[in-house]
Image (spheres, rainbow, N blue to C red):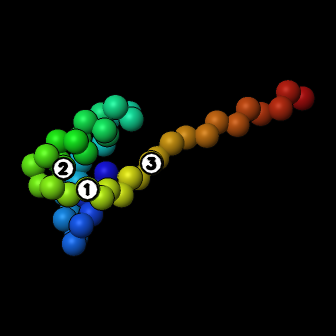
């Protein structure tokens, strides 16, 4: 998660879910007035091998 309004540069640590992200943004907006964030997601896709 990165704050972005004139290269704010604030970054959250890796957050464990939508609610944690929302909390972090709310806090950051309260502290800095920043309102724009770039959200970066990382996830895994699992593909099951077909049974032979
Ligand atoms: Zn910021």
Residue 29 position, x and y percent, is 18, 49
**According to the image, label 3 marks what residue?**
41
Q: Is residue 13 visible?
A: no
Residue 9 at x, y percent in the picture: 20, 63
Q: CA distance from mark 3 to mark 2?
A: 20 Å
Q: CA distance from mark 1 to mark 2?
A: 6 Å
Q: Which mark is residue 29?
A: 2
Q: Quadrant of the C terminus?
A: top right
Helix, strand or loop status at disc 2:
helix
Residue situated in front as seen by the camera: 27 or 16:
27
Q: Badge 1 is on which residue? A: 35
Mark 3 and mark 2 residues within 8 Å of each other at the beta carbon: no
Q: Is the residue under label 2 in contact with that under label 1 (CB below 8 Å)?
A: yes
Q: Earlier in the sequence, mark 3 or mark 2?
A: 2
Image coordinates of residue 28 in percent, x first then y, are: 17, 48
Q: Residue at x 24, y 67 (%)?
A: 5
Whether disc 3's CB lies below 8 Å from ligand 1 is answered no
């Amino acid at each position: 998660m990165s704050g972005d309004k004139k290269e704010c540069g604030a970054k959250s640590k890796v957050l464990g879910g939508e609610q944690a992200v929302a909390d972090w943004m709310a806090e950051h907006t309260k502290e800095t007035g920043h309102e724009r964030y770039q959200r970066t997601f990382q996830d895994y896709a699992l593909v099951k091998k077909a049974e032979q």
